[in-house]
């Protein structure tokens, strides 16, 4: 599962990690802002079908974040969790729970390294074990959960 | 367990994903499905039952044989959904590119040591 879409790589490493790599044509300071300022986060994490209803982040060690979306049929969902480490504009480690379920935690390490005049971003999403990662990757629980829900609900499931 | 949980559970198992992948090539008997796996036919049958209960596959009755096949609408939606998942990150990053393009450079700090790694991406 390593699709390469315009320079983006998604890779599985070891038993528990999903790694997403992407380059940006702007320096780490700007990328950091886009990743940590709610007004900017909303511009790229929300879509017309899935507006964000809550977007809060305190990007410091001991801080936390809470991102919530409303889906087209009124279904809402959120990701939230503590920020463990932050070293602007290069590094952040945070823990992500889906819909407040602390049993499904992913620890996400984001590194922004200057690359010429741009930035190389590496995100490592670490799950509790291989099964949790498999679940997250194969079912889309790392991102786009609402779309996944919508599509699964559209499946002609019997029983 | 909701249907949604059932689908997640059904797809969380590597053997069941392999069965889905095999059935994507066309219907197959239980014996055919068991062959690539180092597990017993009853174990395969249990996996098939999980997939059938999750609505992802169905049994066709053909005389005395009982081939399994993907439910056509289910597989179309499923494949579409997997492709969608892969593209979610890239769609988000393309929006992020646009956000970055609109940001003023004013707060950019001093240049940092260059550490070229991998291909540069310019949208």
Image: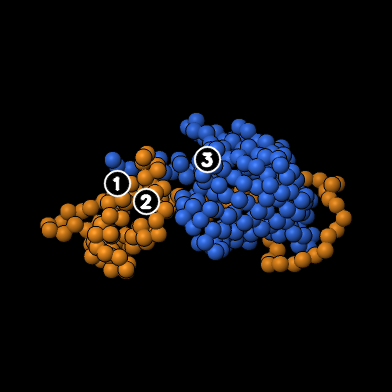
**Residue under circle 1?**
B53
How far is disc 3 from disc 1 in space, using C-alphas?
Answer: 26 Å
Chain ID, mark 1: B
Q: Which mark is residue B113?
A: none
The percent coordinates of residue A39 (x first, y second) are 71, 37
Q: Looking at the picture, do discs 2 and 3 lie on one chain? A: no
Q: Are marks 1 and 2 in contact (CB under 8 Å)?
A: yes
Residues under labels 2 and 3: Cα distance? 20 Å
The answer to which of B105 and A61 lies nearer the viewer is: A61
Circle 3: element type: strand
- What residue does disc 3 label? A101
Q: Are the residues under marks 3 and 1 on the same chain? A: no
Q: Of tags 2 and 3, which is closer to the observer?
A: 3
In the figure, the shade used to draw chain B is: orange
Category of crowding for the residue at label 3, using alpha-carbon neighbours closer than 10 angstroms: few (below 14), some (14–19), many (at least 20):
few
Which chain appears blue?
A
Mark 1 or mark 2, earlier in chain: 2
Q: Position of residue B22 (x, y in %)?
A: 34, 62
Residue B81 falls left or right of residue B58? right
The quarter of the image holding the C terminus of chain A is: top left
Estimate how packed mark 2 is, as few (under 14), some (14 to 19) or many (20 or more) residues with alpha carbons within 10 Å: many
Give the CA separation, mark 1 to mark 2.
Answer: 9 Å
């Amino acid at each position: 599962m390593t699709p390469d879409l315009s320079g983006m790589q998604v890779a599985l490493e070891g038993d528990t990690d999903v790694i997403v790599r992407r380059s940006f044509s702007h320096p780490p300071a700007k990328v950091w802002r886009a990743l940590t300022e709610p007004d900017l986060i909303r511009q790229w994490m929300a879509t017309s079908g899935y507006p964000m209803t809550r977007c809060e982040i305190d990007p410091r060690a001991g801080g936390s974040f809470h991102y919530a979306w409303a889906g087209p049929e009124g279904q809402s969902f959120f990701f939230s969790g503590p920020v463990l480490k932050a070293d602007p504009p290069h590094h952040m480690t945070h823990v992500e729970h889906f819909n407040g379920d602390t049993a499904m935690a992913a620890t996400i390490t984001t590194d922004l390294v200057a690359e010429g005049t741009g930035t190389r971003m590496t995100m490592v999403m670490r799950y509790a074990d291989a099964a949790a990662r498999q679940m997250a990757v194969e079912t889309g629980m790392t991102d786009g959960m609402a779309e996944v829900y919508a599509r699964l609900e559209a499946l002609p499931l019997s029983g | 367990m909701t249907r949604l949980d059932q689908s997640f559970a059904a797809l969380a198992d590597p053997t069941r994903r392999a069965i889905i992948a095999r059935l994507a090539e066309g219907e197959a008997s239980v014996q055919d499905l068991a062959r690539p796996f180092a597990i017993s036919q009853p174990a395969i049958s249990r996996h098939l039952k999980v997939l059938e209960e999750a609505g992802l596959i169905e049994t066709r009755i053909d005389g005395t044989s009982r081939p399994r096949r993907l439910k056509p609408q289910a597989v179309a939606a499923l494949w579409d959904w997997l492709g969608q998942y892969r593209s979610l990150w890239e769609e988000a990053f393309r929006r992020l590119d646009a956000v970055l393009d609109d940001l003023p450079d004013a707060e950019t700090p001093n240049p940092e040591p260059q550490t070229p790694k991998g291909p540069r991406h310019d949208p």
